[in-house]
Amino acid sequence: MLNNQTMDRSLNKSIKPLALLLSVVVLSVYTTAGKTAQDTAEPQTGKTIILAIDGGGIKGVIPATFIQHIESSLRKPSYQLFDVIGGTSTGGIISAALTTSKKTTDRPYTAEEIVDIYSHDGGEIFLAQGCKVELCATYYADNGRGGGVEPYLQKMYGPEVSLVSSREKMQSLPGNRVKHMFTTSYIVNNSQKKVAKPVRGENFGPYLFNWFDAVNSPANDNYYVWEAARGTSAAPTYFPIANVGGKTPPRSAAANKWVVDGGTMSNNPAAWGVTEALRTGIASRLEDIIVISLGTGIYKGGAGVGINSNAITDIVPVGGNWSTTPWMVEKLDDLEGADHNRGVLIGIVLDAVQTVTNSQLTALKQAGLKYYRLEPELTYTQSHMDNIHPRNIQSLIATANAYIEGEGAEAFKAILNELQ
């Protein structure tokens, strides 16, 4: 039960960051950064195969496990299988890893290596802050002593490996197929100051870190790869807003931006994969596109909220007659009666932007698009994006394995056939 004091504490912890998230989602519009393919070569003939990977924190081990099975089954690395690789949040981290050569091997990460990262390095990425101020993010960006998600990503991709240099290296690899990589984000500011007349695409709005714009507009868009990974995974309330570019070390000389997690507007980036293939000239017709969309699992109870089961006398009104506080507090029941981990609003929004994309692309199959989706169902405990306990990570891997042998077996087999 929630008393007034508890509600006040929950409100103080939740309302400001969640209000930011709500404003981000409401303002989200369908735009892309940069140019179109007018100055590129003619689109290739044949099929364009897109790999799109959802956001979900530590649950990224699920799509990484799917990709591991794809690579082992076909005995090829991902960069020899896909034309476009893109992701949101943890999916963006995976996408960058699959398309950025490691200094030690001169090849990108394999899916097996990425699974190993999730299995062993969660504590380095989710490094809890000991905040001296109220309402700070749960985890460090950089603790000033080499710890936090930013130093980790710099080590993972290289501190000064840019999107352009990453692309050039990939083009030189024998058998490479990847022509484009992107990660999603949302701009919330570009100067850290008040803006008299905000401009969409500069001061706010969807933004894709991507190879095409980095090549065609390097002064503005050639970010470091680690910035593309950091920006796409700057989940509100979990991590600080990401400051990228601006030429202040360790950041790149690209345009200064403050961005949040791409999951605030496209947790499932598959639609972006389609539009990026068309925008860049890699594909010219919907019927020539194959999308392989990998989810991080869904806990269906978290996609909704209890109504009268949340009604507490004199605190939460009955019948969903709610103002700000009930929507923002962390402890309201979900559909199954469990506590919403980060507040009911953030849970519903992130699930909504994920399932809407799936519904839209499923409908586009009637227009010739080939679309495959892998996403297992999760338990409440598994659904927390920062549950880095080894037992939970192993359960996520086991769930992914069981899914492609059971409910998802037919779709997985079809995916392998497309990639042959």
Image (cartoon, rainbow, N blue to C red):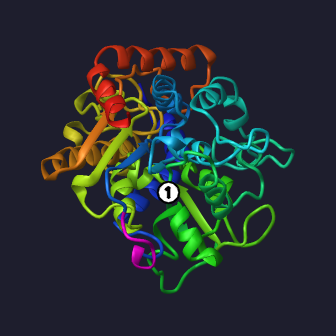
State the image coordinates of residue 44 (x, y, percent, origin top left): 37, 61
In the image, 22 versus 11, the foreground residue is: 22
Magenta stretch contains residue 307: no
Quadrant for residue 161, please give it: bottom right
Residue 189 shows up from this direction:
no
For the point 43% across and 41% down, the residue is 54
State the image coordinates of residue 267 (x, y, percent, origin top left): 41, 47
Q: Quadrant of the C terminus?
A: top left
For the point 41% across and 22% down, the residue is 380
Residue 249 shows up from this direction:
yes
Q: Which residue is mark 1?
A: 179
Under mark 1, the amino acid is: Lys
Q: Residue 69, relative to residue 133: is it above or below? A: above
Q: Quadrant of the N terminus?
A: top left
Q: Residues within 10 Å of mark 1 (few under 14, many from 20)?
A: some
State the image coordinates of residue 150 (x, y, percent, origin top left): 72, 49
State the image coordinates of residue 123 (x, y, percent, origin top left): 70, 30
In the image, 4 versus 252, the foreground residue is: 252
Q: Secondary structure at mark 1?
A: loop
In the image, 81 versus 159, the foreground residue is: 81
Quadrant for residue 418, please give it: top left
For the point 64% across and 72% down, the residue is 192
Quadrant for residue 169, please give it: bottom right
Magenta stretch contains residue 39: yes
With 115 as the anchor, is 3 left or right in this view? Answer: left
| Residue farthest toward the left in the current orientation of the protein | 366
Looking at the rendering, the stretch of residues picked out in magenta corresponds to 37-43
